[in-house]
Amino acid sequence: MGGHGFENERFTLLCVDDDPTVVAIIKRIFEKEGYDIHTASSGRQALDIMGRVHIDAALVDYMMPEMDGLELISTMREAHPGTMVIMVTAHGGVQEAVQAIKLGATDFMEKPFSVEAMRSRVGNLYRIWQLKRENERLKQKVEMRFGYESLVGDSTVMLRLKELITKVGPTDASVLVEGETGTGKELVARAIHHQSRRCRGVFVPVDCGAIAQTVIESELFGHVKGAFTGAHTAAKGLIRAADGGTLFFDEVGDLPLPMQVKLLRTIQEREVRPVGSAQSYPVDIRIVAATNKDLSEEVGKGRFREDLLYRIDVVHIRVPPLREHKEDIPLLARHFVMESSRDVSRVRDISPEAVELLERYDWPGNIRELANVIRRAAALGRSELIMPEDLPPTIREAKGSPAGLVRPEGSRLRDYERAAIVNALSLSGGNRKKASRILGIGEATLYRKLARYGLASEPGGG
Ligand SMILES: Nc1ncnc2c1ncn2[C@@H]1O[C@H](COP(=O)(O)OP(=O)(O)OP(=O)(O)O)[C@@H](O)[C@H]1O
Ligand SMILES: [Mg+2]
């Protein structure tokens, strides 16, 4: 999975210079190396190309009419932050070179350059590019081995969730996963399976709400040939199909009462009796169930059997709604951007302004809704960055505040500063390193300010 499709992609180099001889030389050198070369004679043309093709590295000449190299580099850093840049200056152009590095250029070279020097400096960028890709591939491999490849998030609640999964995974105990729609219940169930001794066995999902009532019994428990009209052949059923693996009952609250009785018996006796059969078959399954309802309430209303609940709710895992861990939004958004850029889109990242809007929204559809918003924005996006205008109106107009914004209690500057700090702490889930990054100040400065405002022992703020 993943990784592939990367393999054949070539290193893409853009040469921007108004001198056609230089362009021709560069083209000749690097076409031989097998790079994909694009050329532009002005800054405008370069940006135009970068709007259409993903460029890994660019050689930018300083002296150009209209837009000089520095101007081009600063524009590029905004719209294409992933592109590496080598600035090419006239001999003695140290001043411009320093400026270029400050703007984010990776390297600089003086004109005239030797072919050898040029080859070796671009070669450095090529190796950085290869390493980045290699890293990406390794990361995917590691994630796949640990099973929860897609449980993204490093907020306190998500870390606690992952820890719990690691703990209960290997126990073989039944698990009830509770959470709102789109929070990742199925992912959690799959992660549990991957963490268990059954990981080489199958994971069989059963969508209890989607199977027609008339066929649900034979779907689950199987049937013998001729058990009912239309049963021309025997069927094993989903429970026996999951033998040796994990059976995932999605929306278990939708299971009809008679099926609940039969399932309970299967769990207790570790046997399945197909419809129309006199014989029972032993099964070895682990049960993980998911619900977005409060099942004890359902028990109270007589819609769910208490004895079955008792059997499946041995370990209870609550998956938090996204609004309870908004700190994960930037990471999740980037994760879905990466996912999209692997196939269709050339969008590579998301702008801070767009992230801020995402953090203001309340996400009733949780992570699934976020994934859909990002995928749509990536498909429509005009640049490499997702911008606020790529987001749907409901999100652009969200009035909410990131994790409940605190308003200053006065209007003195220090009141605002205090409120900003409290907000940053709450956004970062109390993590001071992150909070200082949000505020754009050093950690030491943050500590001083925390002490000054009497916030030093108030981890979460607001
Ligand atoms: N922590 C996460 N990291 C990355 N992707 C996630 C995460 N949680 C959920 N997703 C993604 O969000 C989508 C919804 O997840 P999932 O189907 O597991 O939710 P669910 O709780 O089962 O939803 P429903 O109740 O509607 O069935 C999936 O595409 C899933 O990959
Ligand atoms: Mg689900």
Image (cartoon, rainbow, N blue to C red):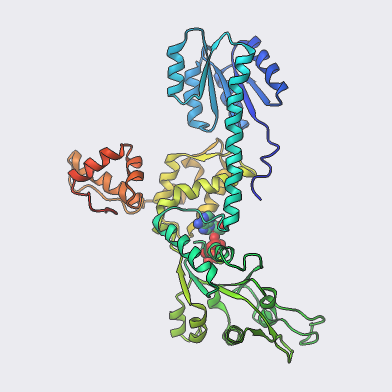
Q: Is residue 262 above or below residue 25?
A: below
List the single residue furthest toward the bottom.
278
Q: Is residue 83 left or right of residue 448?
A: right
Is residue 392 something one can see in this rendering?
A: no
The image shows residue 65 at horizontal and vertical percentages of 53, 12
* Residue at x 62%, y 76% (from the top left corner): 285
For the C terminus, the image quarter is bottom left
> From the viewer's perspective, is 358 left or right of 13?
left
Residue 45 horizontal/vertical position (percent): 59, 21
Q: Quadrant of ligand 2?
A: bottom right
In the rendered view, tell whether residue 69 sits above or below residue 235. Answer: above
Towards the viewer: 108 or 78 = 108
* Residue 301 screen position, x and y as percent: 45, 85
**Rendered image quadrant of residue 294:** bottom left
Front in this rendered view, residue 168 or 183: 168
Q: Specify the quadrant of the image occupied by residue 223.
A: bottom right
